[in-house]
Amino acid sequence: MPIILGLVYCLVMSLIAEPHRRRFNAIMVAGAGAAYLSGGGLGPWELPFTALTAYVAYRGLESWTFIGLGWLLHTAWDVIHLLKGHPILPFAHNSSLGCAICDPVIAAWCFAGGPSRRRSAAYPPAPA
């Protein structure tokens, strides 16, 4: 199911026209970077990770490569939280595992330049 969710995310996001698609996805990866803050499972380490993903997301405003990198950073954070027993959704024990499976699917789409399912002459594909 996490792979399907990743594919659905990419499909829905591909409907947004460029350059808005890239910028919206940069915001999404910034939000993902802060997702563990409320649980604080890794204590003060949550803060530098959130700062790092905020920087990567900022760079992602102009680069699909940085957005993909942000999703891979979040994947690593998901795995660490899974191993430490602090799931992203406290009421769903395996939620970090699902996220760790879903995020690389999104990252791969981002590394491919966040391609659209539709073509538009007004917004050609953005450079990575």
Image (cartoon, rainbow, N blue to C red):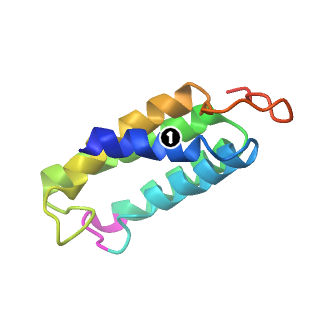
Instruction: Relative to 43, say whether 13 is above or below.
Output: above
The answer, for residue 120, to whether it is visible in the render is yes
Residue 30 spot, x, y in % from top left: 54, 56
The image quadrant of residue 76 is top left
Position of the N terminus by quadrant: top left
The answer, for residue 72, to whether it is visible in the render is no
The residue at 35%/64% (across/down) is: 36
What kind of residue is marked 1? Leu
For the residue pair 27 and 66, the one nearer the viewer reads as 27
The residue at 72%/44% (across/down) is: 17
For the residue pair 39 and 5, the one nearer the viewer reads as 5
Residue 46 spot, x, y in % from top left: 37, 62
**Residue 120 lies in the magenta stretch:** no
Residue 103 spot, x, y in % from top left: 37, 42
The residue at 45%/63% (across/down) is: 34
Mark 1: secondary structure: helix
The residue at 84%/29% (across/down) is: 121
Position of the C terminus by quadrant: top right
What range is drawn magenta here?
39-44
The image quadrant of residue 119 is top right
Q: Is residue 19 left or right of residue 112?
A: right
Q: Is residue 7 left or right of residue 39?
A: right
Instruction: Relative to 116, say whether 78 is above or below.
Output: below
Instruction: Relative to 11, say whether 33 is above or below.
Output: below
Q: Which residue is mark 1?
A: 11
